[in-house]
Amino acid sequence: MNHELLLQLFENRSGEYVSGERISQELGVSRTAIWKQIRKLEAAGYQFEASRRLGYRLLSTPDHIAVDELSNRMTTGFFGQTIHYFETVESTQNLARAAAEEGAAEGTLFIAEQQVSGRGRMGRSWVSPRGKGVWMSMVLRPKVPIHFAPQLTLLTAVALCRSLRRLTALPIGIKWPNDLLIDGKKISGILLESAAEDERLRYVVAGIGISVNLDEADYPADLLEKATSLRISSGQKWAREDVIFEFLKEWEQLYVLYQEQGFGPIVTLWEALSVSLGKPARLVTPQGDFVGVPIGLDESGAIRIKLEDGTVRPVFSAEMGEPI
Ligand code: BTN
């Protein structure tokens, strides 16, 4: 049975119930075939209401990123100049990594409407429901040694924060190293995975997850305390094309600046957007936990933590707990 015909039938009756019998007559198919097709459409993001008495009613159709429109609009030199767009993937990180291994050009972008095994930092999973967010990974080929990779993470956070603030006017800040927060709740995540040879970075796969139009119902209950979306925070829906467009423009500008002038300018921008500086925090590292006050970034990208005895300790990698 052709799902286009079924959808057309519902769309012609804009939001009204259509009985199973009626559908069955009009399309010449069995009630079981209709039920199966509706299940399939639901899995693809369509929402129906079913009533034993009245039949089915189409509530909403899935939102899609208009990739052609986005490509035509793009003003970047190389970020997102090639876009590979998918409906459902395991993780865009895997696709970008495989492409990078095959020699994909810098700036090649993979976008998916839905990830079924989205990955977060520290081996966590990443909630990536269909049609609600920006789930994407890009191939980078920076000409810097491997130990500079954390700088790229901070640079990416700055670009994302600046572009989202410009677009939404929401009070978004950066929690070290790269979480973007609104009122203490996370709205995006950045995951950089690199491949190196000796000291040289062969490529970096930069994964960006932006919770754009997620509703509260899209989050597991335990995450709701810690996570939010642009939609929940602003009370309005955002065009994902605008989010991607603004971010890629900003990200490329900062990336070019970084390659030309080094990390100094990024430090200044990061510090201006940080919500972590000056607030005592617990840092959880593989070598143990300690408490201190983050006071700034150093030139390598480490955060400078002032300890109780007044000494300053640079920290490259840790989980930063709630301010204490
Ligand atoms: C974090 O834990 O904060 C990082 C989350 C990164 C999520 C993005 S979504 C696109 C890309 N694909 C993935 O599987 N993860 C990243």
Image: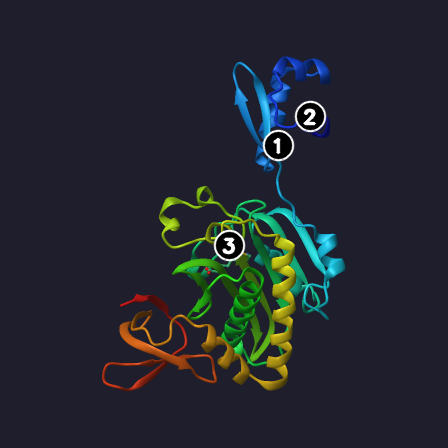
Residue 314 falls in which quadrant of the image? bottom left
Q: Residue at x 46, y 53 (%)?
A: 233
C-alpha distance separating marks 2 and 3: 34 Å
Q: Is residue 289 left or right of residue 15?
A: left
Q: Are marks 2 and 1 in contact (CB under 8 Å)?
A: yes
Give the mark, 2 or 3, whose residue is nearer the N terminus: 2
Disc 1 residue type? Leu
Secondary structure, mark 2, is helix
Name the residue type under label 2. Answer: Leu
Q: Residue at x 29, y 73 (%)?
A: 280
Instruction: Give the x, y percent position of residue 84.
Output: 69, 55
Crowdedness of circle 2 by 10 Å Cα count: few (<14), some, many (20+)?
some
Q: Where does residue 44 sit, x and y in percent of width and height? A: 61, 37
Q: Residue at x 27, y 74 (%)?
A: 291
- 258 in relation to 24, above or below: below
- First reached walking from the N terminus: tag 1 or tag 3: 1
CA gap, disc 2 to disc 1? 10 Å
Which quadrant does the C terminus fall into?
Answer: bottom left
Task: Provide the residue designation for mark 3.
Answer: 230
Tally the marks: 3
Query: Left or right of 12: which side holds 230?
Result: left
Is residue 69 in view from this perspective? yes
Q: Which residue is mark 2?
A: 6
Location of residue 17 in the rendering, given as x and y in whole percent from the top left corner: 60, 21
Residue corresponding to mark 1: 41
